[in-house]
Amino acid sequence: MGVKNLVIASHVDDEVLGCGGILDETFFVYFCGIDESKIKKNKEATPTGERFIELKKVADFLGFKWECNEKSKVNHYTEQEFIDIFEDLINSIKPRKVFLPHPGYNQDHRTVFNAAFIALRPHDKNFFVKKVLVYEAAHDVIWNPKNMNLNYFVPIDIERKIKAYGLHKSQIRGMRSPQLLREIAAVRGAASNCKHAEAFEIIRWCEDAR
């Protein structure tokens, strides 16, 4: 089965926090940056570093393909550095759906969302993606829950999502714990008449011609 969907992730682990329940072999995930400094002081991420090892385990478990930008510096993103990257990526993959990070209080999330929003504009040189959605970030659910218009829900296997998140061992912490992900999924499930779900905000949704 080929790639049909694109997830743009500001950081490694955002893909599981927001889309872990739907990720499979039909997805390509583009990571805008990776940083190991919170694991070992002043240590940069390398292909043999802990974060890369965790990422590879998650991708193998969920089945998605991926690429990681090793040049951009986490917490110092600029819109301009990503616009062309995103346009080229979208024109290459030609995805049916694109999933973007919610532009909450995190500066990298806002920068990545804005750059992707520009890259997804209708333009002669751009592939037109018919379905564009925004995924949740656990910290935004806690800090600014009224800032998203959740209008698209997908039932998920929460145990699969929790297992995938557990593979990002270095990133698990109290304010985005596996239990928090379970509770968010239960609330989204209650809102959509299922046990657990992931919720998204639709930015653009165009049906195929009949």
Image (cartoon, rainbow, N blue to C red):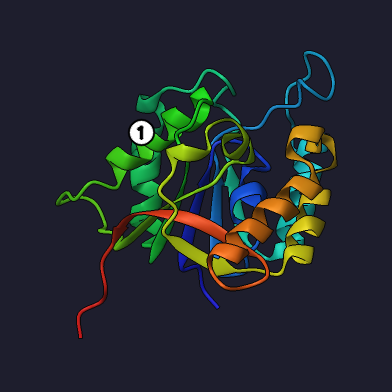
Q: Position of residue 31 (x, y in %)?
A: 57, 41
In this view, which residue lies farthest toward the left?
Answer: 124
Rendered residue at 46%/39% (across/down): 146
Hey, what amino acid is under mark 1?
A: Asn
Q: Closest to the observer: 137 or 210?
A: 137
Rendered residue at 38%/66% (across/down): 96
Quadrant for the C terminus in the image? bottom left
Q: Closest to the observer: 178 or 59?
A: 178
Q: Position of residue 102 (x, y in %)?
A: 47, 40
Rendered residue at 78%/19% (across/down): 43
Quadrant for the N terminus in the image? bottom right
Residue 20 in view of the camera: no
Q: Secondary structure at mark 1?
A: helix
Residue 133 in view of the camera: yes
Q: Position of residue 58 (x, y in %)?
A: 75, 54
What residue is shown with label 1? 114
In this view, which residue lies farthest toward the bottom?
Answer: 210
Q: Position of residue 162 (x, y in %)?
A: 78, 56
